Image (spheres, rainbow, N blue to C red):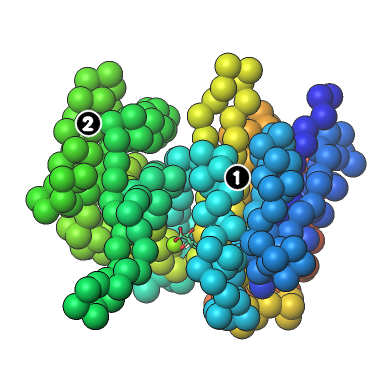
């Protein structure tokens, strides 16, 4: 079997704990002869800042570029609140996204049947919910120039960020959305603020043009504020939502909470495929570093594990193993095994490592049955 190389950047807070469970699964899959994965580990975020003075080193970026994919834990924590903007843990994440040109961020919001009561919304509103947010990740107001805090002649200070999008930036992320919709329910909702922003007007016009190539997919446009409202009112109207970097940041947090289980949600950030078939890719849980519970064995490793499943599917050509992990995750939940964040009456509360073990046991049982 061809060797595949993964860079693991566990990061801060609960990052190392949840990645510990992912490493156990990689070890298990390798031992079973199902994969041939070699891992390299590097620091990122605050951990990298403490060790190297920067939230991500150039060496780490180079390894990331050469790897089949990167698995990231989480970055950030109050410890680094006082650190300069461009050296903060978050800056490391933004740099790796930008340097690897990971322009398409896939954030699924799925309601697991076993966890339906974890949502703050009524079960009948969220039952079976399966939305995919495709967030543009390397452009827009996060990276636009000019930016900065400027001193004005009148003594005032002025904070400036710039929202910029070009046609090619809109088209490449739009394509990802249309192509993924083809494998789902075939519907794309494109969100912007074309009513007040020129960048939004361009976004809407370019998405409409691009749609000519994807006539089999249904495209609708929605103002981002309306989308925020519709997500709460009737979330199942959505299949794929495609939107810019900032709106995507906000709408994906909102969508994740519809599921009530942030600890379960994976994400993928993908670049373009080059002529040799290589595609830069980074997989990370949607949740953050949760410094308040770090080091206590309380974190839910499922989001990190399901992110690894996405890596198996999108980067490592192991879709069947991905299916196997996802089915096992559902089974573990159906068996009432829960970490604290998704605990419910009548269930058994387990630690981070116990959750990882339960998943591996379930995978073993299923493999035996299949053999
Ligand atoms: C996210 C986060 C990041 C973002 C931060 C940590 C820089 O909120 O991935 O959604 O704003 O993109
Ligand atoms: Mg966010």
Q: Quick check: is the Cβ at mark 2 less than 8 Å away from ligand 1?
A: no
| Nearest the eye: 80 or 12 | 80
Is residue 274 in view from this perspective?
Answer: yes
Q: Marks 2/1: CA distance?
A: 27 Å
The quadrant where residue 136 appears: top left
The answer to whether 184 is drawn above or below residue 344 in the figure is above
Report x, y in % for residue 347: 62, 75
Q: Secondary structure at mark 1?
A: strand
* Residue linked to disc 1: 282
Residue drawn where x is 19% and y is 60% of the image: 225
Classify residue 48 as left or right of residue 118: right
Q: In the image as oriented, which residue stretches furthest toward the right?
A: 31
Q: Quadrant of ligand 2?
A: bottom left
Report x, y in % for residue 213: 27, 18
Report x, y in % for residue 229: 21, 63
Which label number is shown at residue 271?
A: none
């Amino acid at each position: 079997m061809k060797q595949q190389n993964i860079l693991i950047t566990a990061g801060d807070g609960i990052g190392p704990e949840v990645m510990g469970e992912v490493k156990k699964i990689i070890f298990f899959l390798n031992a079973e002869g199902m994969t041939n994965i070699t891992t390299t580990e590097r620091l990122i975020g605050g951990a990298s800042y403490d060790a190297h003075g920067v939230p991500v080193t150039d060496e780490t970026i180079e390894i990331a570029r050469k790897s089949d994919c990167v698995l990231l834990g989480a970055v950030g924590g109050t410890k680094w609140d006082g650190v300069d903007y461009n050296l903060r843990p978050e800056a490391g994440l933004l740099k790796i996204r930008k340097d690897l040109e990971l322009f398409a961020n896939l954030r699924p919001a799925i309601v697991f049947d076993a966890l339906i009561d974890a949502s703050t919304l009524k079960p009948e509103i969220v039952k079976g919910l399966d939305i995919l947010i495709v967030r543009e990740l390397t452009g827009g107001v996060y990276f636009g120039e000019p930016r900065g805090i400027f001193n004005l002649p009148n003594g005032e200070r002025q904070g400036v960020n710039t929202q910029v999008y070009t046609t090619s930036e809109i088209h490449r992320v739009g394509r990802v959305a249309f192509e993924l919709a083809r494998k789902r329910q075939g519907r794309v909702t494109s969100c912007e603020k074309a009513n007040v922003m020129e960048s939004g007007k361009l976004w809407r016009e370019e998405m409409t043009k691009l749609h000519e190539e994807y006539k089999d997919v249904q495209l609708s446009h929605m103002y981002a504020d309306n989308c925020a409202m519709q997500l709460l009112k009737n979330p199942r109207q959505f299949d794929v939502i495609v939107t810019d970097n900032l709106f995507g940041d906000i709408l994906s947090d909102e969508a994740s909470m519809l599921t009530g289980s942030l600890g379960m949600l994976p994400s993928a950030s993908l670049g373009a495929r080059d002529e040799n078939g290589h595609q830069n890719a980074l997989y990370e849980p949607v949740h953050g570093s949760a410094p308040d519970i770090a080091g206590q064995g309380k974190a839910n490793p499922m989001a990190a594990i399901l992110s690894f499943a996405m890596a198996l599917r999108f980067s490592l050509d192991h879709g069947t193993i991905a299916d196997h992990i996802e089915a096992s995750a559902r089974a573990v939940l159906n068996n009432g095994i829960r970490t604290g964040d998704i605990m419910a009456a009548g269930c058994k509360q387990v630690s981070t490592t116990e959750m990882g073990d339960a998943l591996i046991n379930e995978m073993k049982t299923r493999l035996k049955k299949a053999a």
